[in-house]
Image (cartoon, rainbow, N blue to C red):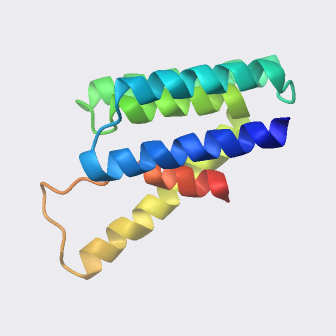
C-alpha cells in the first residue's frame, strides 16, 4: 500500500510541477487534493515516527516564515508542498529532499548564467526540482 502512496504522491508532484513551470503558480484546488491524498496516506502508511513528522512539519512552517520575510521569493504553494512532504516523509527525508532539489535548482541556474540568458526578472519554479528529487 505504501508503494502505491509513493507513486500517487509522485504523480501529484509531477502535476504540480508542470503547473508551476507553466504558470508560476499552483492552483488551490490541486493543493487541496494533494493535501487530502498525502494526509490519508500519512495515516495509512505508519512507516515514519510521529516526532519525525512533527519535525518535517516544522521545516514546512519555517519555509512559510522565510517566504513571508523574503516577500515570496519561495512561493506559498512551494511552502505548502514542503509542509505536506515533511509530514509524509518525516524531517530527515525532507531535508535530504530539499538538499537535492536545491542542488538541482542551483545547477539549472548556473546553466542559465553560463549561457548568459539570466536576467533579474527571471524566476525558476521550485516544485519541478522537488519532483525530480523525490523521484530519485
Quarter containing the C terminus: bottom right
> From where the camera sits, is residue 33 visible?
yes
Q: Residue furthest bottom?
A: 115
* Pick the front one: 20 or 54: 20
* Residue under the point 18% across and 78% down: 116
* Residue under the point 69% across and 29% down: 88
In-image side of 33 versus 38 (left or right): left
Q: Is residue 76 above or below residue 50?
A: below
* Pick the front one: 111 or 19: 19
In-image side of 37 versus 32 (left or right): right
Quarter containing the N terminus: top right
The image quarter containing residue 111 is bottom left
Query: Total number of numbered labels?
Result: 0
User: Where is residue 52 shown, x and y percent of the image?
Assistant: 76, 25
In-image side of 47 versus 36 (left or right): right
* Residue under the point 58% across and 27% down: 84
User: Where is residue 109 shown, x and y percent of the image?
Assistant: 33, 66
The image quarter containing residue 16 is top left
> From where the camera sits, is residue 56 visible?
no
* Pick the front one: 24 or 83: 24
User: Where is residue 68 shown, x and y percent of the image?
Assistant: 30, 23
In-image side of 115 versus 100 (left or right): left
* Pick the front one: 94 or 41: 41
* Residue under the point 74% across and 36% down: 5
User: Where is residue 8 shown, x and y percent of the image?
Assistant: 66, 40
Q: Is residue 87 above or below residue 105?
A: above
Amino acid at each position: 500500500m505504501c508503494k502505491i502512496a509513493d507513486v500517487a504522491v509522485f504523480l501529484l508532484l509531477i502535476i504540480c510541477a508542470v503547473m508551476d513551470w507553466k504558470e508560476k503558480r499552483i492552483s488551490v484546488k490541486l493543493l487541496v487534493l494533494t493535501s487530502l491524498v498525502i494526509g490519508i496516506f500519512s495515516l495509512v502508511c505508519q512507516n515514519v515516527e510521529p516526532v519525525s513528522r512533527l519535525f518535517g512539519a516544522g521545516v514546512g512552517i519555517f519555509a512559510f516564515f522565510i517566504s513571508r520575510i523574503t516577500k515570496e521569493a519561495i512561493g506559498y504553494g512551494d511552502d505548502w508542498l514542503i509542509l505536506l512532504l515533511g509530514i509524509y516523509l518525516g524531517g530527515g527525508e525532507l531535508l535530504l529532499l530539499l538538499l537535492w532539489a536545491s542542488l538541482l535548482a542551483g545547477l539549472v541556474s548556473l546553466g542559465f548564467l553560463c549561457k548568459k540568458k539570466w536576467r533579474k526578472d527571471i524566476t525558476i519554479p521550485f516544485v519541478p526540482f522537488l519532483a525530480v528529487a523525490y523521484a530519485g
